[in-house]
Amino acid sequence: MTSSVFISISNITQDWEECIRKWNLNLFIIPATVITLATLLANPILLTSIFLSRALRQETRYVLVANTLTADILFLILNLTMVICNAAKARFHWLVCELVTAVTVTVYCCAILTVTLMVVDTYAAVRWPLRYHDILPPARIRRILVGVWLLAAMYPFTLVIIMEVKKVTPHETGAVCLVLISLGFIEGQNRDQIHIYFFITALICTILILYCYIRLYMVTRTQGIWQNRFSRARVTLLAHGVLLLLYFVPGFVFTLELSLFLRKDISQDVRVWISTINMCILMLLPRAFAPYLYGLRYRELSDTLMQLLKQHRRLGQITG
């Protein structure tokens, strides 16, 4: 069983590598690197602003922002590492590739779940302003976030453990390491389970987001905050809506990739192109926009950041 499985994986990864070489898709490493490095410069600055400010650390929404930024940083590092290693033709031990896949899925799902919690947090703050701090204090939200990380990690790591216990995966190396190939192979062994997992997760998040936004509109429509075309409420809703769209679209594209992965009537070139664009562009866009949208949306965060920059400039002038 293991020998035949490895032949299949070896053939898939080898064909994938040849297709990348044929179309020069390794050039996508350039936008992937630029977007990743730009985001990795911005995210730690916002995280530092949150962690150094006692007032921000005590705000539930900033705890959620910090968790999203942390998950995004981990995802960007893992994603860029895979892109660079694949471009450099580094060969991965298949167990290592599976573990990287599990961690990548975990941090991606954690970011999606945390963004969904941010919508719920906004709804709670508007719906119950007097009881908000009692309903979602920072200590409680931290415990919820621990549960989010465990929930996001449970399914992918369980799959890896099951595959190892059953000795379904080969202890060999592959030509490329991609989340799509790892999950596509696992899906071949566990029909429909992965689709059900992603579908249920996306459905729950979508229902929660739509419910909260509809209820928010119904609660606030009589207060006049929607009448001005450029009101703060409209701008906030638009910014968060764009960010949610950017987070969810790559997930739906990835689900499409999984459904096409084992189909014989779909050209290998099409699968490789879709996967490369999603991995090197689409999945990075929400993480690139997030720190700037958060900085514009949350005035306290931008004010804290400006204060830290002024303090740093003063220290530089004194020491200089």
Image (tube, rainbow, N blue to C red):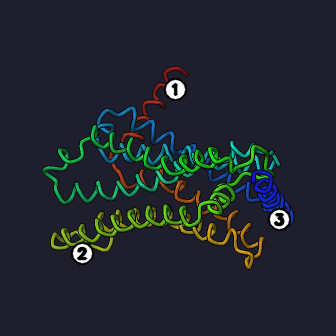
- Looking at the rendering, in which quadrant would you find the N terminus? bottom right
Mark 2 lies on a secondary structure that is loop
In the rendered image, which residue does mark 3 sit on? 19
Above or below 136: residue 289: below
- Where residue 300 appears, x then y in whole percent? 33, 45
Alpha-carbon span between mark 3 and mark 2: 53 Å
Above or below 156: residue 318: above
In terms of depth relative to the viewer, which is nearer, 97 or 272? 97
Considering every residue shown, the one lying at the far left of the view is 130
Q: Residue at position x 74%, y 75% from top?
A: 264
Q: Residue at position x 49%, y 40% from top?
A: 45
Alpha-carbon span between mark 1 and mark 3: 51 Å
Q: Residues within 10 Å of mark 1 (few under 14, many from 20)?
A: few
- Where residue 262 appears, x then y in whole percent? 69, 69
* Mark 1 in CB contact with mark 3 (< 8 angstroms): no
In terms of depth relative to the viewer, which is nearer, 10 or 234? 10
In the rendered image, which residue does mark 2 sit on? 227
Indicate which label's residue lies in the foreground, 2 or 1: 2
Alpha-carbon span between mark 2 and mark 1: 47 Å
Q: Which of pointers 2 and 1 lies earlier in the amino acid sequence?
A: 2
Q: Which of pointers 3 and 2 lies earlier in the amino acid sequence?
A: 3
Q: Which of pointers 1 and 3 lies earlier in the amino acid sequence?
A: 3
* Count of marks overlaid on the render: 3
Image quadrant where residue 134 sits = top left
Q: Does the image show residue 7?
A: yes
Mark 1 lies on a secondary structure that is helix
- Looking at the rendering, in which quadrant would you find the C terminus? top right
Q: Residues within 10 Å of mark 3 (few under 14, many from 20)?
A: some
Q: Amino acid at mark 2?
A: Gln
In the rendered image, which residue does mark 1 sit on? 316
